[in-house]
Image: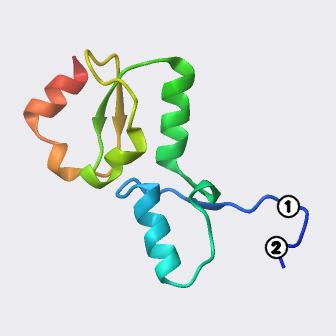
Amino acid sequence: RLRSAPVTVRFVTNTTKESKRDLLERLTGLGFDIAENEIFTSLTAARNLLEQQQVRPLLLVDDRALPDFTGIGTDDPNAVVVGLAPEHFHYEMMNRAFR
């Protein structure tokens, strides 16, 4: 019914552990008929902000989330993006992020 209504359909999540492509595969595997552009995640919001502010982030996100940041420059970071990535939360990385 939503598809035939004059509304925009979005699937929204706050997950930071996986990319939109991974979410799409999981949801279509469950029988959802959706397109990747109908998925909006907290990583989508982070990427939009990075692009708007034209900053270069240090990405403290799970490796499975990195595809959502393809094309974003990360050399000489001047911002930090934090996601659920316990493997990145150690002294060396925290020190780098604070610098």
Residue 99, how many percent across, how many down? Answer: 21, 16
Numbered mark located on residue 2 in the image? 2
Q: Nearer the viewer, residue 3 or 88?
A: 3
Q: Which residue is mark 1?
A: 7
Residue 32 position (above or below residue 43): below
At x 24%, y 22%, the residue is 98
At x 32%, y 45%, the residue is 66
Residue 15, how many percent across, how many down? Answer: 44, 58
At x 15%, y 25%, the residue is 95
At x 49%, y 66%, the residue is 24
Type of the residue with mark 1: Val
Q: Disc 1 to disc 2, how far (Cα)?
A: 7 Å
CB contact under 8 Å: marks 1 and 2: yes
Mark sitting earlier along the chain (1/2): 2
Crowdedness of circle 1 by 10 Å Cα count: few (<14), some, many (20+)?
few
Residue 57, how many percent across, how many down? Answer: 35, 26
Q: Name, please, the residue furthest toward the bottom.
A: 31
Crowdedness of circle 2 by 10 Å Cα count: few (<14), some, many (20+)?
few
Element on which disc 2 rests? loop
Q: Nearer the viewer, residue 88 or 63?
A: 63
Residue 37 position (above or below residue 34): above
Residue 72 position (above or below residue 76): below
Element on which disc 1 rests? loop
